[in-house]
Amino acid sequence: MKKGSGVRAIPYAVVALLVVVALRYTPELPVRHAADVLQQGEPLAPRARPWSRVETLNRGETLIGLLRRAGVSDQSAREVVRAATASAVNTRYLRAGMPVDVTSDSAGQSPRELVFHLGIDRLLRMTYTAAGWIGNEERLPWKTDTVVVRGTIHANLYQAMDSSAAGFFPGHAKDELAWALADIFEYRVDMSRDLQDGDGFHALVERAVGPEGITKVGKILAASFSLSGSNLSAIRFEGRNGTEYYDSTGKSLRAAFLRAPLEFRRISSTFGLRFHPVLGRWKQHKGTDYAASSGTPVRAVGNAVVARAGWSNGYGNLIELRHPNGFVTRYGHLRAFGRGVRTGARVSIGQTVGYVGMTGLATGPHLHFEVLVGGVQRDSRVALKSIGGDPIGRGERDAFESRRGTLLAMMTENAGVVRLAQVDRSLVTH
Ligand SMILES: [Zn+2]
């Protein structure tokens, strides 16, 4: 920057220059690591301070390398690393993609403050002082509240969630919420098959909003689906035997069979209720086809003994499981079998028994699933229908009913934030 020309226009020129520099040095935030359970919310607003910019640690890059890029001298960089290490931050294990805010002196020359975003709610602030670099680790607060989400199904659960949870949960968190609901109801509802146009749901969900607007799906306190006019609720209850979901009559949502051999989270968000990808079929096709990409884990829908695991003509690689109640389930077109899955082996409910493929007569990767009762194929929707698991213990009945009353009442409120205090009060009832 030039100085001292004495002309009045100079301050304006300086401001303009600052703006230009600020814009130049405000790169887009990196996408956070996919392994983070937490979701990225709104992108960061561009930094207002002129001599601030964000650098990102590249894969394989050392902290020294990043600092050098940020304009920190080698000697200063070594000081930073020393001070960071003194603040108990292991500089060898910083994750690639970590954003570092660099704030320089007013001339934009020497960095004066470095903020390392160690995690979503953890940062290390390094400040340059007369005594050299000093590091301070900071924890950023999360704000928790509870929201009611209500939706109507038109195409599928993802799309319903996309519109109904908008404003409460950003982007991918909405999928997380759909998956969490599917998990809660997995013994009762096949979310990829059982929902019809016009069905609806309510959910009472805890939400944690972190620094930078990152939003996390917390506990689902209660949820309810209306499926073709009939209602199915899930109430989260912390009882003596741990935390479990119960229906409104107090029966556990757990049952002997899962309703679907694929986890809902593995099913593409592009599937629809009315149209289904055209799948390979052969004569007298009796079963249910699940479109999924090759390699998707296939799970046993119940505890069983493997009756066969091998090649069977049109089925390709086929697994046949015999369940304790005499039901047999079949899983066809598999690309491969799960570890230890061979005739005579025992498998437990939810265990991965194979992987989706297109062996046998199949034109695309999908799982062919059958339920046989007395040797005859039956509609899995009917055969695996469960009306409930174990009822809640007698001693806990009153506490459960009181909790159920509170949660179901809250869920009938309009979509939006519900006061957390109300939830807390209901927690005191047992
Ligand atoms: Zn099929």
Image (spheres, rainbow, N blue to C red):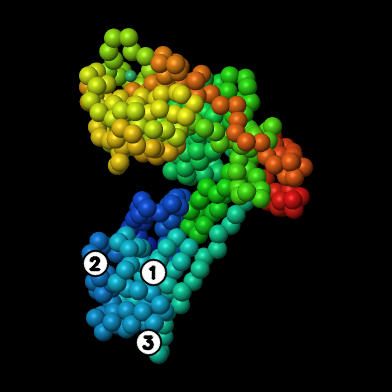
Image position, residue 69 (x, y; %): 25, 70
Q: Disc 1 marks which residue?
A: 116
Comes first in the chain, label 2 or label 3:
2
Which of the two discs, 3 and 1, sits closer to the camera?
1
Report how far apart the C-alphas of labels 2 and 3 lie in the structure.
Answer: 24 Å
Q: Disc 3 marks which residue?
A: 132
Give the structural element (helix, strand or loop) at label 1: strand
Q: Quadrant of ligand 1?
A: top left
Q: Give yes or no for contact between labels 2 and 3 (Cβ–Cβ under 8 Å).
A: no
Please tell me in which quadrant of the rendered image residue 294 appears. top left
User: Which residue is situated farthest in the top direction here?
Assistant: 284
Residue 92 left/right relative to 153: left
Residue 276 left/right relative to 401: left
Q: Disc 2 marks which residue?
A: 61
Q: Name the amino acid, label 2.
A: Glu
At a point 43% along the width and 43% down the height, the residue shown is 172
Comes first in the chain, label 3 or label 1:
1
Quadrant location, the N terminus: bottom left
Report how far apart the C-alphas of labels 1 and 2 lie in the structure.
Answer: 15 Å
Residue closer to the observer: 40 or 318: 318
Please tell me in which quadrant of the rendered image residue 229 appears. top right
Give the structural element (helix, strand or loop) at label 3: strand
Which of the two discs, 2 and 3, sits closer to the camera?
2
Residue closer to the observer: 400 or 30: 400
At a point 36% along the width and 67% down the height, the residue shown is 100
At a point 36% along the width and 63% down the height, the residue shown is 99
Q: Is residue 103 visible?
A: no
Q: Name the amino acid, label 3.
A: Gly
Residue behind label 1 places its C-beta within 8 angstroms of ligand 1: no
At a point 63% along the width and 43% down the height, the residue shown is 236
